[in-house]
Image: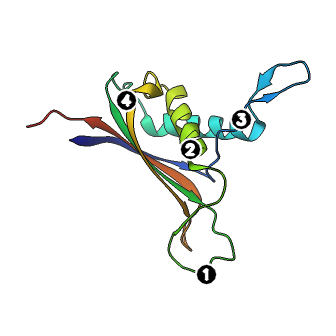
Amino acid sequence: MWKCTHTGIIFGPPVAMGRPRMTKQGRAYTPAKSREYMSLAIDQIQTQWGDRLQLANEPLRLHLVFVHKRPKRITATERVPKTTKPDIDNLIKMVMDALTKSEIWPDDNIVTEVCATDWYANEYEQPHTMYSIYTKQPPF
């Protein structure tokens, strides 16, 4: 059985982890958009996490909900599944890296289960990413 230990939100449009790029000199770098979002996400995660201790090195479950800006062509009033780029696996990687760099957990290899959904916002929502972290609870 899993128990939710923390839920947080990263305000702003979700951004996927960009592929490393190479300079003419052969040095690898992360694209600016990815670096900027990573910095924003780390700041928001650390502010929301507060003075809590880092999670122990134990199996974790991560639940993610990505909500993107609603295109004008969508007339439905509720959330609509998003099936366009960026790919959900790159969105997941960005958040997991931000949580690792925020020192919420020692390394993202302790995440043993991930559930993620990708949506266009309903008519009243702003773009954001919600995350919930669950720890494994012993049976009663």
Residue 137 position within the rendered picture, expressed as x and y whole percent measured from the top left: 20, 35
Colour basis = rainbow
Report the front residue among 89 and 121. 89
- For mark 4, what is the residue? 52
Query: Are discs 2 and 4 less than 8 Å apart at CB?
Result: no
Residue 103 position within the rendered picture, expressed as x and y whole percent measured from the top left: 48, 25
Q: Nearer the viewer, mark 1 or mark 2?
A: 2
Q: Which mark is residue 89?
A: 2
Tell me the quadrant of the picture where the N terminus can be found: top left
- For mark 1, what is the residue? 75
Q: Quadrant of residue 23?
A: top right
- Give the CA distance from mark 3 to mark 4: 32 Å
Looking at marks 2 and 3 on the same chain, the residue that comes earlier in the sequence is marked by 3
Residue drawn 34% across and 33% down? 60
Q: Is residue 59 left or right of residue 79?
A: left
Counting every numbered tag in the picture gives 4
- Give the CA distance from mark 4 to mark 1: 42 Å
